[in-house]
Amino acid sequence: MRQFLQQRWRSNKFLLGAVVLLFLAAFILNRYILRTTSAAYYAGRIQRVFEKREKEAEQTLKDTERLSTFARGVYTNEELEEWTEENKGFSLFISELQPSGFRKLIFWSTQSVDPPLIRSRDAVRAGLLFLKNGYYYHRFSDIAIGDKRYRVQVLIPILYKYFVEL
């Protein structure tokens, strides 16, 4: 029996060494080199970007001074450029709520999407929407500035879908 084990050990030393070396190489590659090519890495990165945009959108909905500037139309071209979807990562829409129930769109930061029409007051204030050109995270708030009421909507793009894609 002992002789059999010694013979097997001699003949399989190289194979055992190769297996250990391959496991070590796979561990090093996975741990230090290929980490940025995994799906989990990119999912985490996308989630962090989305959370950053969501926090920024939430701060925007609370910034009544900035919103009143946009609602009154007294802003500079530089301020407008700062608030485009390309710079902020989300779209901003401000509509004046008319006593008749209609809305009058008075400010928009993008031309790539139309703001959704929210009819009821008890509608969900945040959620996922599918619009004509993709999926968006939608959030809105009603504010009063002076004697007028406004609905402020934020759309954070998640996935663009166009009817013609190359």
Image (cartoon, grey):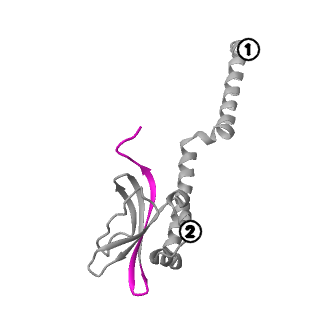
Q: Amino acid at mark 2?
A: Glu
Magenta run includes residue 163:
yes
Q: Which residue is mark 1?
A: 10
**101 sits to left or right of 65:** left
* Residue 127, above or below 68: above
Q: CA distance from mark 2 to mark 1?
A: 77 Å
* Residue 57, above or below 4: below
The C terminus sits in image quarter: top left
| Figure label count | 2
Counting residues from the start of the chain, the first of labels 2 and 1 encountered is 1
Residue, far bottom: 147
Mark 2 or 1, which is nearer the eye?
A: 2
In the image, 1 versus 78, the foreground residue is 78
Magenta run includes residue 161:
yes
The residue that appears at 55% across and 71% down in the rendered structure is 76
Magenta stretch: dominant secondary structure: strand
The residue that appears at 41% across and 63% down in the rendered structure is 138
Q: Specify the label residue 79 is tagged with.
A: 2
The residue that appears at 53% across and 48% down in the rendered structure is 43
| Residue 143 coordinates in the image, percent (x, y) | 42, 79
Q: Amino acid at mark 1?
A: Arg
* Residue 132, above or below 54: above
Magenta range is: 143-166
The residue that appears at 50% across and 70% down in the rendered structure is 58
